Image: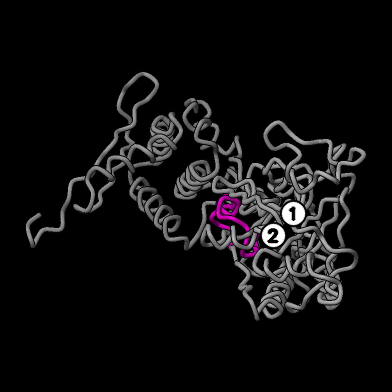
């Protein structure tokens, strides 16, 4: 490219109608000389994502504009052209919107007023009607729109625009804010509940998300919705938690729908209880929407049943870290029980020590007898995601195993018990058979 030239050719595509004829719609992509091949790929991606009849829609809207102009007398035609351009300029620059009230046709309507009304109808139809409907529009339908006989469809959120001058007689009522406490499941977006998906994609004005919610879930949220990620890290958890709760109250007081998005299920170590009480004390009763808990989903994705006849008759879920980072009392060993520990991988050596050491040495960190060192254990990281990883070993060797594989991939959890081996290979469902404990170390 010459030094003094900033022009580059675009990779273009001309849309055709159903009959194969060229339409007025043409798009071009340029990378300004930085990647010509990539420009072609981007152009193909854009074209593939647009409706096939988008070119026909442009053609039909152009015809409707022409009809609107043709109705005005020659001296007002210049006025309608200017009005058309002004309206489009306002739309593009967001000074105004096509949803301004359009006056109904009246018997006393002047020619300039009629022209202005028609152009505004065209703007509304262009903005809110589905592309497929625009592409199929007949001339009789166009005439009906321009005559004011067919009211264009408007966005439900904009059906009642606020008056320019507030009035005590206005029927526009202030919108009441609300707060939703929502569980996002173990990670993969396909595991969102329908209620959660609806809250994120159709209801939210503001999403306050925990930092462990994966990008694949956040990508579902419309671009018009603001997303804030919790700034939780060791030593700042309490401050970040309060910051998110205060932000939710402030937004709800402004009439917004706030979605407080949490990993897994909000009431399974998600601090939902304290948020419910906090929001309630500030005048908002939150709606709690359950999520698929990782405590159950992660073992399933790893091929580990938390209960299995002949192996595990019960399971227990606990946390590996207490409030403000304090140690917690872990349960003692029961051969027929699966233990699920959340938020414990980062302090795995301390957890293993608390489970296996003598009661006198443990200092009360375990309630019950010690776990045998040959007890199976599995660490599950990023459950349900494409990069899910499962590390299986015994309590004796798991710390060494984790050190040997390198960096951790949060979020992770710990599964301890004979259920870890129940479905491995040909399976082992005879753990609870009479005398089965005598061969535990060989398993």
Residue depicted at x 73% and y 51% = 376
Secondary element at tag 2: loop
Residue depicted at x 55% and y 55% = 215
Residue sitting nearer the eye, 425 or 105 = 425
Q: Is residue 58 visible?
A: yes
Residue 142 in percent (x, y) is at 50, 32
Q: Is residue 10 left or right of residue 400?
A: left
User: Which numbered dot is residue 374?
Assistant: 1
Residue 318 in percent (x, y) is at 81, 62
Do the residues under discs 2 and 1 have CB atoms within 8 angstroms? yes
Q: Residues within 10 Å of mark 2 (few under 14, many from 20)?
A: some
Residue sitting farthest toward the right: 434
Residue depicted at x 86% and y 72% = 359
Magenta span of residues: 205-226
Residue sitting nearer the eye, 416 or 226 = 416
User: Measured along the vertical axis of the image, is residue 350 above or below residue 418?
Assistant: below
Q: Residues within 10 Å of mark 1 (few under 14, many from 20)?
A: some
Residue 353 location, quadrant: bottom right
How far is mark 2 from mark 1, CA to CA? 6 Å
Q: Is residue 117 left or right of residue 273?
A: left
Residue that carries the numbered disc 2 in the rendered image: 396
């Amino acid at each position: 490219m010459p030094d003094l030239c900033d022009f580059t050719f675009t990779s273009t595509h001309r849309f055709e109608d159903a009959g194969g004829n060229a339409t007025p719609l043409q798009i071009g992509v340029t990378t300004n000389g930085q990647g010509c091949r990539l420009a072609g790929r981007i152009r193909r991606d854009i074209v593939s994502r647009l409706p096939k009849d988008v070119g026909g829609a442009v053609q039909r809207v152009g015809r409707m504009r022409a009809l609107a102009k043709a109705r005005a007398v020659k001296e007002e035609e210049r006025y309608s052209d200017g009005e058309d351009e002004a309206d489009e300029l306002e739309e593009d620059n967001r000074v105004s919107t096509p949803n301004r009230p359009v006056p109904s046709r009246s018997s006393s309507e002047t020619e300039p007023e009629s022209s202005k009304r028609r152009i505004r109808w065209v703007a509304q139809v262009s903005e809110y009607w589905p592309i497929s409907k625009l592409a199929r529009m007949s001339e009789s339908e166009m005439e009906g729109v321009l005559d004011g006989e067919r009211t264009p469809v408007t966005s439900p959120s904009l059906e009642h625009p606020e008056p320019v001058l507030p009035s005590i007689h206005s029927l526009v009522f202030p919108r009441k804010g609300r707060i939703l406490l929502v569980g996002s499941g173990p990670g993969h977006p396909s595991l969102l509940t329908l209620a959660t998906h609806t809250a994120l994609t159709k209801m939210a004005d503001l999403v306050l998300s925990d930092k462990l919610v994966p990008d694949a879930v956040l990508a579902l949220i419309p671009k018009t919705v603001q997303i804030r990620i919790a700034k939780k890290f060791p030593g700042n958890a309490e401050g970040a938690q309060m910051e998110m709760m205060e932000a939710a109250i402030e937004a709800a007081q402004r009439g917004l729908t706030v979605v407080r998005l949490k990993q897994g299920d909000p009431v399974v170590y998600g601090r939902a209880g304290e948020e419910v009480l906090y929001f309630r004390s500030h005048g908002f009763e939150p709606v709690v929407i359950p999520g698929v808990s990782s405590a159950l989903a992660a073992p399933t994705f790893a091929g580990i049943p938390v209960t299995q006849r002949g192996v595990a008759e019960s399971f227990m879920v606990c946390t590996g870290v207490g409030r403000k980072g304090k140690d917690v009392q872990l349960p003692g060993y029961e051969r027929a029980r699966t233990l699920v520990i959340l938020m414990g991988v980062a302090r795995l050596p301390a957890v293993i020590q608390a489970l296996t050491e003598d009661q006198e040495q443990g200092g009360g960190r375990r309630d019950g007898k010690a776990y045998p060192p040959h007890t199976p254990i599995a660490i599950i990281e990023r459950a349900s995601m494409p990069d899910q990883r499962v590390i299986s070993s015994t309590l004796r060797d798991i710390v060494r195993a984790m050190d040997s594989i390198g960096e951790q991939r949060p979020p992770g959890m710990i599964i301890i018990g004979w259920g870890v081996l129940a479905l491995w290979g040909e399976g082992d469902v005879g753990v609870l058979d009479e005398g089965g404990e005598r061969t535990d170390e060989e398993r």
